Amino acid sequence: MTPKRSQRPVSIFLLLSIGAFLAILPSSAASAADYVPVNGGGSSWSANAVDQWRRNVQQYGMRVNYASTGSSDGRNQFRNGTIDFAASEIPYGLTDGGVVDTPPSRGFAYMPLVAGGTAFMYNLEVGGNRLTNLKLSGELIVKIFTGVITSWDDPAIARENPGISLPARKIIPVVRSDGSGSTAQLTTWMAAEHGGLWDAYCKLAGRATPCGLTSNYPLVSGKGFVAQPGSQGVSGYVSQSANIGTITYVEYSYALKTNFPVVKMLNAGGYYVLPSASNVAVALLAAQINTTKGDKYLTQILTGVYRNADPRAYPLSSYSYLIVPTAVAGSFTSDKGKTLSAFANYFLCEGQQQAEVLGYSPLPINLVQAGLEQVKLIPGAEIENINIRSCNNPTFSSDGTNTLAKNAPMPNAADKYMATPDPDATTGSDSSSNVGTTSGSGSGTTSGQSGGSSSTGSTSIFDATSISEKGPVKCDADTGACTFVAAIAVNPPSTIGWGLQNTQIVIAAILFFGLVIGPPLLNLALRKEGKG
């Protein structure tokens, strides 16, 4: 039976509305099928950044699982094929304590993940107040972590911290109990810059010399060192109120997370500096990329970083690697490769906008460009979506310079080696806790380590699980006190293009038009037809 003319507009309207509504369902199903879950593990040094980025991409249908088990465990699991990717601060093939870390038999490549500074977080009080402006040269740091200097009131420490009445308290170095990239970074630097002290300690620990790099910190009986697993473990131990006198090495992000101070480290330019994003960026301008084994390696040579004479450079700056498959093998498929490559494209570009807030330093354009070439090697990568021109990275500039490093402020005059002490900066007062600085944009004051404005005085604890909601920080240039001030806008990764959210917005607009605008138009049409 043919419907009456007056029923036809109603039928057409209902069919269009229902069709638009149902269109959402297959779109959701298709999106879920686009990205299959991938599993990774390894570096705790990089974990705060990786955890934030993987949460960011969940809204686009990507599920990236990551276990912060330490760099050595991550490399072992990747070699054994139990995870799809690994994060590490050191590559395969190095000899550690006479044992060679054998590379995997399957195809793999390294790509830069995130840059940052290995910081020396400490818990020390002067006159009942937390000390927030401790300064140490590299030699003193090595002597502390080899048990040569054992008390905080040692004359050598006092000479570098004039005006502070340091307590006669035992120094308790806290080291990693597991195989870690943080330990490898520290010991690589100690071996390169203070090899005599490091070898003497290793000999006491029963290790062959020259000691060189190790990812497992050797312990000597009677030295009073404390060993804890993971970056969370060492930073958590030092931050306990009962553990005054402790000091550890950890990625700067964890000091921010626990709201504790870090050492201002003496650089080759003669200034004590914090591991801020801008100071790390300046230091890494002197890094070299090792390509002697082929383009897939991209490992870093940091001798120039350690000895960078720029007054702003933080000596113990480096970047970590993501280790990715370059062939389908075992449980790794092209579908997994599609997810992993989209995630890598995201963190190399858009994700780097959050690096500074998280306590890291954004990768510069040369490392991003090299990293994007590595992304193309992952099976299943959508190569047409990988383009440096659409990469929204905060260090990029039109002339190719590193914006963050270019605008990095000069240090305070009071932070020059053996400068006249600033009474306000060296009293040890805890009125606003020092966790260093995360701002280095160059805007605002140029008198300190940070280019940010003064703190509002808040001492809220950094919560890495909700950093995108809390937003960026402002830090005081002298004390380093930081507070969150606004929310971060997270933009969609460029690799995804027109995705589920875009489709749903269009469909919602159609439904809105159909349900709100449609009835009056339909009523008007019916009236005209009735008159006819």
Image (spheres, rainbow, N blue to C red):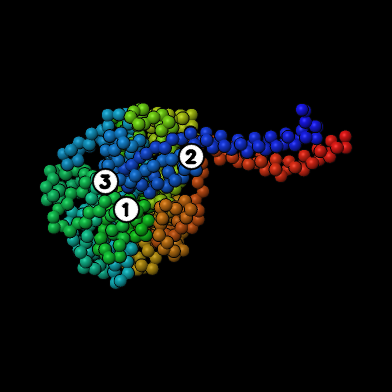
Let me know if residue 439 appears in the view.
yes
Label drawn at residue 131 = none
Q: Residue at x 31, y 57 (%)?
A: 236
Looking at this rendering, what residue extends furthest in the bottom direction? 127
Q: Contact, CB < 8 Å: mark 3 with mark 1? A: no
How far apart, in angstroms, are the residues tagged by discs 3 and 2? Answer: 31 Å
Let me know if residue 140 appears in the view.
no
| SS assignment at label 1 | helix
How far apart, in angstroms, are the residues tagged by discs 2 and 1? Answer: 29 Å
Q: Earlier in the sequence, mark 2 or mark 1?
A: 2
Label drawn at residue 232 = 1
Q: Amino acid at mark 3?
A: Ser
Examine the image and state in which quarter residue 161 appears: bottom left
In the rendered image, residue 282, in percent from the top left (x then y), is placed at 37, 47
| SS assignment at label 2 | loop
Q: Amino acid at mark 2?
A: Gly
Q: What residue is pinned by disc 3? A: 180
Q: Residues within 10 Å of mark 3 (few under 14, many from 20)?
A: many
In the rendered image, residue 335, in percent from the top left (x then y), is placed at 43, 31
How far apart, in angstroms, are the residues tagged by discs 3 and 1? Answer: 12 Å
Q: Contact, CB < 8 Å: mark 2 with mark 1? A: no
Q: Residue at x 26, y 63 (%)?
A: 243
Left or right, 446 with reference to 147: right
Q: Earlier in the sequence, mark 3 or mark 2?
A: 2
Q: Nearer the viewer, residue 450 or 150?
A: 150
Label drawn at residue 61 = 2
Left or right, 219 with reference to 77: left
Q: Residue at x 45, y 43 (%)?
A: 351
Examine the image and state in which quarter residue 274 appears: bottom left
Q: Amino acid at mark 1?
A: Gln
Q: Residues within 10 Å of mark 1 (few under 14, many from 20)?
A: some
